[in-house]
Image (tube, rainbow, N blue to C red):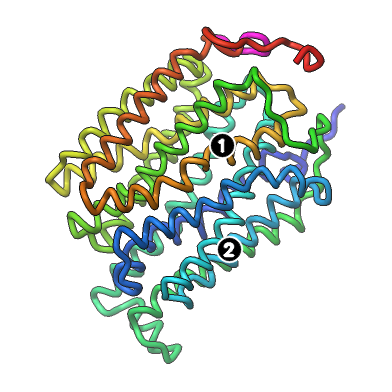
Amino acid sequence: MKPTKTWQSRPEILLMVMAAAMPIAFWAWVVLLNNFTIEVAAFTGKEIGVLQSLREVPGFLSFLVVYLLLIIAEQRLALFSLFILGVGVALTGYFPTVIGLYITTVISSIGFHYYEACHQSLSLQWLDKKTAPERMGLIYSVASMAKVLVLGAIFVAYLSSLSEISWRALASSTGLRTGLESYQITYLFSGLATCGLALIAYILFPQFNETVRQTRKIVLRKRYWLYYALTFISGARRQIFIVFASFLMVEKFGYSLTQITALFLLNAAFNIFLAPLVGKVISRIGERAALVFEYLGLIGVFVAYAFVDDGALAAGLYVIDHMFFAFAIAIKTYFQKIGDPADMASTASVAFTINHIAAVVIPAVFGLLWLISPAAVFLSGAAMAVVSLLLSLNVPRNPQAGDEVLFGYRGRITKAAE
């Protein structure tokens, strides 16, 4: 009789715990950012573009993760990176200047991007190929639950502050003023919560052994070229949403902090139920069909962004746009099917670097373009989605090693033949 596994002995549970810890700090930072930078630091599109470009530099350097794995186990690096993310976010409110925000952003970004690279790699290593899309959907759902909790808390707190209840009572009891201090408290609490969960996970979970010894060097294989291309365009297109869609809501339509928080909250609530469904859909219809559906939808959304003049309609587009994010599972499981099991950690770190090549440049360059024509920014995003659509049509219906693409270079099944 096999011994019953405890929850602490199941690596997928650790993946869920980490997935729940990350949004607490990260989404508190994201949802407050535009209002915080505009109201407190007097940012324009130029400064926010530079800040977002700086935020992507650690993502561009994610390939260094593979060298860190020479001195620290990947599971521990993931948890340590989570802790760094929490520290960076906790400090954000106490440096409300252009330079201060640039520095704290880089600190939190190092933690975020290195955590994401490790978490993706560990997911591909620990999850079975047959059930990976569904399991990843469940992990996304858990992350969305945590996101709902933190965004709900922010929404209630700041909504209460409008009626002189929550933050003013807290400020009074601590001798603080309202305004800047409310941002400081939110950033501090959310950052420390992520730090605390990282420490708890480190203490409670054992060190899980590698099922396959991972390559401890940078790996670039020709047969992965379509995965690299999909990842590159995805990173470029994603920046349009992350940086400029929410900035549109604040600058053009005058959305308040509570309204922006409500949008994020609605998105997260949808993903609790949508992400597991998307995982099941990908398992059923395959990566190719899922990606084609995603990019067709995104083309329409970005074109609509360019010409929308109604704040409510823009909010609807924002929610629809975010709902497509869960389909990113398909790119990951596509690689899991075509990749060598020993390449997961190395390729995950390289993929994050590829994903951020354009992401380092686009926020700053498009921030300047924004000053001339916001519509041109979103039409550029639509063009990127068109490129992604064309690439997705090259994904086989049943991808595997040796059958990575429909057209172009095909790899060989054995590494030695490469």
Q: Nearer the viewer, residue 287 or 238?
A: 238
Q: Predominant secondary structure in magenta?
A: loop
Q: Quadrant of the C terminus?
A: top right
Task: Specify the amino acid type for callout 2.
Answer: Ile
> Residue 33 placed where, x, y %?
38, 62
Report the disc number at residue 107: 2
Q: Quadrant of residue 383?
A: top left
Residue found at x 77% / y 28%: 342
The answer to whether residue 2 is left or right of residue 182 is right
What is the residue that sits farthest to the right in this orientation?
1
Name the element at disc 1: helix
Task: State whether residue 17 appears in this view.
Answer: no
User: Please, what is the three-letter code of the amino acid marked with disc 1?
Assistant: Ile
Q: Nearer the viewer, mark 2 or mark 1?
A: 1
In the image, is residue 283 above or below residue 344? above
The disc placed on residue 162 is none
Name the residue that disc number 1 marks. 354
Q: Is residue 55 left or right of residue 351?
A: left
Query: Could you tell which of marks 2 and 1 lies nearer the N-terminus?
Result: 2
Look at the picture and state if 251 lies above or below 314: below
Q: Which residues are magenta?
A: 398-403
Measured Cα–Cα span from mark 2 to mark 1: 21 Å
In the image, taking residue 29 as reference, residue 401 lies left or right, namely right
> Where does residue 239 sit, x and y in percent of width and height?
40, 44
Instruction: Give how far across and how far down residue 92 sits, in percent.
Output: 49, 70
Q: Considering only vertical position in the picture, is 258 above or below 215?
A: below
* Residue 249 appears anywhere in the view: yes
Which sits in the foreground, 39 or 106? 106
Task: Report the residue at 34% width, 24% height from top.
Answer: 386
